[in-house]
Image: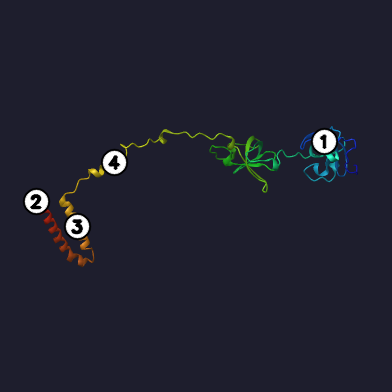
Amino acid sequence: METEALAVPETAQANDLSEIKRKTHFTGTVLKTTLAGALIDIGMDTPGVVHISQLQSEAVNRVEDVVKPGQQVDVWVHRVVPKKNRIELTMIKPLDLEWRDIQPDMVVKGKVTRLEKFGAFVDIGAERPGLVHISELTHDYIKTVGDVVKEGDEVEVKVLSLDKRKRQIKLSMKALEEPPVKEVKEKDIRPAKSAEQAPAVEDDAKDEPTPTAMEIALREAMERSKDKYPAESPNKGKRKSKAATNELEQILYRTLQNKRK
């Protein structure tokens, strides 16, 4: 294994770099390896370099444990430095969506990776899968998450919100569905009550018979008797009951006399 640092040949042309975009995929050939990484031929005048930290996600002790000269590898553009005629590559597949790329209300496609009682996790190409809560799966009532999706299903989801600090993405499937139209049943339709159907409270009051003069006088006498002789102890009540009775008889007598006149 070469011990020299990765160096780009002096024949590299800067104008080739202007056409290369970040995350562009290449299938290249390993030209040589060093302690720092590997030099990759990607079919351009400027070969790319892969740092040892970009060979794979796991830790690497020696570059040749991962790649060897002449080996074909898949690489992606990590960064381009035109002033140095340098193309930095990575063998770690970049994320389709980085945090800065994810925005609320955007619609993306993903794969269901895990089911839980509270919802389904969907890989949308971000650092972490997003969560579709069970309440966001569909407008219909469901008992379990498995009633709607299974692991491995390809689904289309809408981003509801994201928390970059907590690395959380909330997704929804029902947001992309038309809300159900509520059917109106005949029994739910209640016609407005007409005046004829309204309870005749006033009519009932009119039908009540008009009290006679004697009844009115008797009622008044009883009311005055209550005010004049309120209920007290049992002994006092007996003494005053006779007086109250005499007064009622006198009132009734006067009423009858006035009626005869």
In the picture of the structure, the residue carrying the numbered disc 4 is 200
Question: Which amino acid is tagged 2?
Answer: Arg
Which mark, by number, is residue 184?
Answer: none
Residue 149 drawn at (x, y percent):
61, 36
Question: Which amino acid is tagged 3?
Answer: Met
SS at badge 4 = loop
Q: In the rendered structure, which disc, 1 or 4, sits on the residue that comes first in sequence? A: 1
Front label number (3 vs 2): 2
In the picture of the structure, the residue carrying the numbered disc 2 is 260
Question: Which amino acid is tagged 4?
Answer: Ala
Q: In the rendered structure, which disc, 1 or 3, sits on the residue that comes first in sequence? A: 1
SS at badge 1 = helix
Left or right? Give the position of 225 relative to 169: left
Whole-number angstrom distance, CA of label 2 to CA of label 4: 38 Å
Residue neighbourhood size for the residue with mark 2, other residues' Cα within 10 Å, grouped as few (<14), some (14–19), many (≥20): few
Which mark, by number, is residue 17?
Answer: 1
